[in-house]
Amino acid sequence: MAPSKVSVLGNAILFLSALAGAQEPDIPTLYPQSPPAYPPPIGTGDGIPEWSEAYSKAQAIVAQMTIAEKVNLTSGVGWEGEQCVGNTGSVPRLGIRGLCLQDSPLGIRFGQYSSAFPAGVTIASTWDDGLAYLRGYAMGMEHRGKGVDVQLGPVSGPLGLFPEGGRNWEGGGSDPYLSGIGLAAAVRGIQDAGVIACAKHYIANEQEHFRQAGESRIPVEESLSSNVDDRTMHEVYVWPFADAVRAGVGSIMCSYNQINNSYGCQNSELMNGILKNELGFPGFVMSDWQAQHAGVATALAGLDMAMPGDQVFVSGNAYWGSNLTVAVLNGSVPIWRLDDMATRIMASFYKVGLDKDRVDVNLASWTTDVYGWQHWFARENYGVINGNVDVRGAHATLIREVAAKGTVILKNNGSALPLQKPRQIAVFGSDATDNPKGPNGCPDRGCADGTVAMGWGSGTANFPYLISPLSALQNKAIADGTVIQWVVDDYSTIQMEHTATQASACLVFVKAQAGEGFITVDGNQGDRKNLTLWANGEEVIRTVASNCNNTIVTVHAPGPVTMEEWIDHPNVTAVLYAGLPGQESGNSIVDVLYGLVEPGRLPFTIAKNATDYGVSLMYEPNNSYAPQQNFTSGLLIDYRYFDKNNIEPRFEFGFGLSYTTWKYHDIVVRKINAGSYGAFNGRTPAAKTTNVTETPESLVFPAGFHQVHFYNYPWINNTGDVRKDGENGPEEAYDPNGAPIRPAGGAPGGNPGLYDILYEVNVTLSNVGKRNGEEVVQLYISQGEDDDPVRVLRGFRRVSVNAGQTINVIFTILRRDISRWDTVTQNWVISPAEKQVFVGRSSRDLPLVAKLNGENVIGINRNKPSTSWTAGMKTFM
C-alpha cells in the first residue's frame, strides 16, 4: 500500500452532496486526500528536562542493539502470544523483558484482585483535576503491581461529537479544554506511579460503526473516513492531545478509522507532521489492535510500535517483525528510522523509571486460572500465569468519592433531596439491582443486565465486587430505621403501582448502555441506536410517578439521554445523572441522595431532542468503498452548537445543582506583560546516518531455535527473503537532515509562547447558604469573530467554601486560550476582535463578565439569581 497522505490544510473541506452516494471504483479520489509530511522527525530529549536523562539512557542502550533486537521492541508478538493483551519482543542479551501492554482506561482488563474505577465520563463530571490525578495514580499503581508496563489509557478520542457514540464514556467530556485538563492529569498520575500512559485514540475516532471494515455488519471495503478541516482539527480534536504531550505522556495510540481518507496509523501528516513535529512529541506511537494496514508506509509515516503484531489475530502474518527486518536490510526503511522507533520506546521506558522498579508480569488475559500456558494460543510453556497479587490497596475509598462527586443533580424540587431518614422508601428498576449472572457474567461487560456501572468492550475491567444501589440503600435503611420495599422487574407495572403508593420517597433507577463495536447488545453495535432509556425505563418512571408524589430518578448511562417524556412530571421531584460509577456504585449514589457528598456538573449537553445536537451518527454507509463522515459541525461541538444556533437545551454543558446557595460578586481582569509571540525557527534533529553492517545471513533464525507457533519474530527465514526490489516511499521520507519545525512547534505541546500567561482573572465567590459546599467555578471566553463559537470553556476550579465564607478564585488565561488556528500561516493567532471573559456556574449561567482588551478591567455582575439546591429547576439566561 502506498504511503498515506492526510489533509489538514485549507480553511475548510467542502463536500458536494452528489459525492456522498458515489459508487465508482475510483471513489477515494473524490474525497479529501492528504499532503505528505516527511521525513519522520527524530525524537529528542534536548532542552526538555523531564525527557533528557531518559533519552541519554535510551540512546546508549539502543546503540548496543542489533537490528533484530530493535525490531523486537517495535513489534508485538501476536494476539494471545503471551499473558498481556499486547506484548513486544524482548532483548534478553541486554536484560530487557518485552513490554506488557494492558487495557484499560478504568482499571485492569481481565484483572483479578484489582479495582473497577469510575469511567472517564464520571471523572469528567467531577470537574476536579486533582481527583483525576489521584484516579490516574491509583490505576497506575494497580497496573504496575501486576507487571504492566503500558496502561492503555487515558482517553480523549472519541471526544463525543455524536451523543450516541459507543465509547464516549471512556473519555473526558465533550469539550476539548475539559477533556485536555483531565487527560493531562491522568497522564501525570499514571506515570508518577511508574507506568507508561497511552493517550488514545488519535484521532477523530467518533463512532464505532465502520471503524473497521471487517467488523461491520454491512460490508465495506475500507474503514470509515472522518473528514475534518484544518482549523477544527487543531482547535477541537488535537487540543487535548497537546495537553497530554505537554504533560509528558510516553505513548499515543493511533486509531482505527481513516482521517481524510488516510488510515490513522499510516497518517504522515497526523503522526510526523502534527504530533511529532508541531507538538514535539518525544514518545512513541503505537497502533490500535489491527489498525496497521501496511508495513513500510506505516514506518515512514511515524508509527513506532505495531500491536498486537499480527495482521489478523493469530494469523502468524505480520507487517513488521521479520518484514521490518527485511525492509531495513533492503533500504525500504532507513536504519535511522528503526533506531528512532526503538529509542522513543526506550526513552518512555526510562522516563517512568521502569529500569529501576519493574514487577514481573503476574496476570493472564485469557484465563482466571492460576496455572496455564504463557503462550496461550500456541499452548506452550505451562506454569503459573496468574499470580493473583492483590493490588487494590485502599482505592475503594477514592472510587466511592469520585463516583459520588461525579454524580450530577439535574432537578430538585422543594425538599426532595437530601433524604433525611424517610419513614419508608421504595426502589424500582432493574438498574437498582445485581446482574443475575454476576458482575462479570457478561464478557467485557457486553450486556445491560442489572445495574450499569461501566460500558462494554476493551475499555473495561473485572469487578472485584459491585455494590448495587439496592444493596447500599438497604444498608442505609437498616441503619436509619427506614422501611424499604422494591420492585426490580422492569415490566411488573401493577406491582410497581401498589408499592409506590406506600412510600414517602420512590427511588427509580433507569439506564442506557453502550460500548465498543465488536460487541452488539440488543441491536446496538457499540453505538447507541438512540438516546432513549433501556429496559422500559420511560414506562417505569411514568408508572411510579403516577402513584408517588416524591419520585426521585437516577440515570446510569454512558452519556445524555432524552428526558422530555417525564422530566416535567409534577411528581418527579428530583433527577440525578450518575454516569458509570464503577464498583462502589450503590454507596456513591447513597452518599449523594443523603447529602453526604457535593455532586458534580455535566460534561456534555442534555438536549430536549436528539436532533438538537445537529449531527448524525452514520448507521448506514454512504458508499460501499469507504464511508465518508464529514465533520460539517466544525468547531461547533456540543454546547457550542446549541449556543450558536440559539437552541435551548434541557440541561446545558456544565450544569448541576448544589446543596447550598452561591453568590458571584465581582470580576477583575489584570493584563500580564508576556512579550510577543512569533513563529518558531529551527529544524528537527538530523538523523545519525550509518550503513547497515549486519548481513542477511546474521539475521536468519538461529540454528536449533524453537519457534513458538504463530509467534512473531524479528528473524528472517532465509537470505532469499531480502529482495532488492523492496517497497519504497516518497523520496523526501528518506532525508536524514530533518525538516523545519513548524511555526506552532518548538516544545512538547507546541510553541512555548502559547503557554505564556496573558491575563489574570480574579472573581469573588460567596457561599450564602446554610451548609458547607463545593462549587465548580467555570470561565468561558468569547473570541469575538463571527466564525467563532459564542463562547468556549477556558478555565474551571472546583472549590470548597464553608457556609457564610467568601473567597477569591484566580484564573490565568494563556495565549493559547484566546488564539485561533490560522490556516494560511499554519500558526496560532489572536484576532483583533474584542474579547470577553465570562465566569459562572455553567455554559449558560454566567453572571460575571469583563473585557480582555484593557490593561486592568473591572467587570460587571449581571446579578442573576444563584442556582442552589433549594431553588429547584434552574433558570435559563
Image (cartoon, helix red, strand yellow):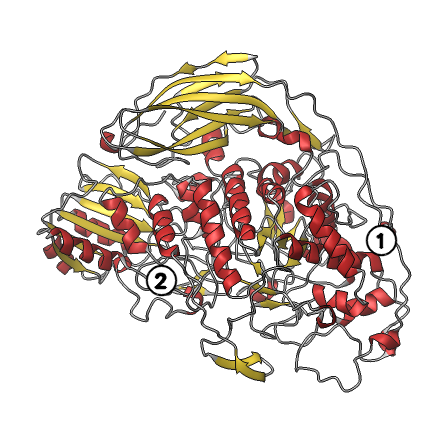
Q: What element carries label 1?
A: loop
Q: Name the residue under label 1.
A: 730
Left or right: 226, with 645 as reference point: right
Expressed as whole percent of the image width and height from the top left, the position of residue 612 reads 43, 39
Q: Is the residue 124 above or below the residue 730 in the image?
A: above
Q: Is the residue 790 above or below the residue 422 in the image?
A: above
Expressed as whole percent of the image width and height from the top left, the position of residue 174 reads 48, 42
Q: How crowded is mark 1: few (under 14 residues within 10 Å), some or many (20 or more)?
A: some
Left or right: 334, with 767 as reference point: right
Question: What's the CA distance linking mark 2 and mark 1?
Answer: 49 Å
Q: Which amino acid does label 2 sit on?
A: Ala
Q: Mark 2 points at which residue?
A: 448
Q: Which of 476 and 215 is in front in this view?
A: 476
Expressed as whole percent of the image width and height from the top left, the position of residue 95 reads 69, 69
Q: In which quarter of the image is the N terminus?
A: bottom right
Q: What element carries label 2?
A: loop
Q: Residue at x 89, y 72 (%)?
A: 695
Q: Which of 720 and 10 is in front in this view?
A: 720
- Residue that protrudes farthest toward the bottom in the picture: 704
**Disc 2 or 1, which lies upstream in sequence?**
2
Residue 103 visible somewhere in the drawing: no
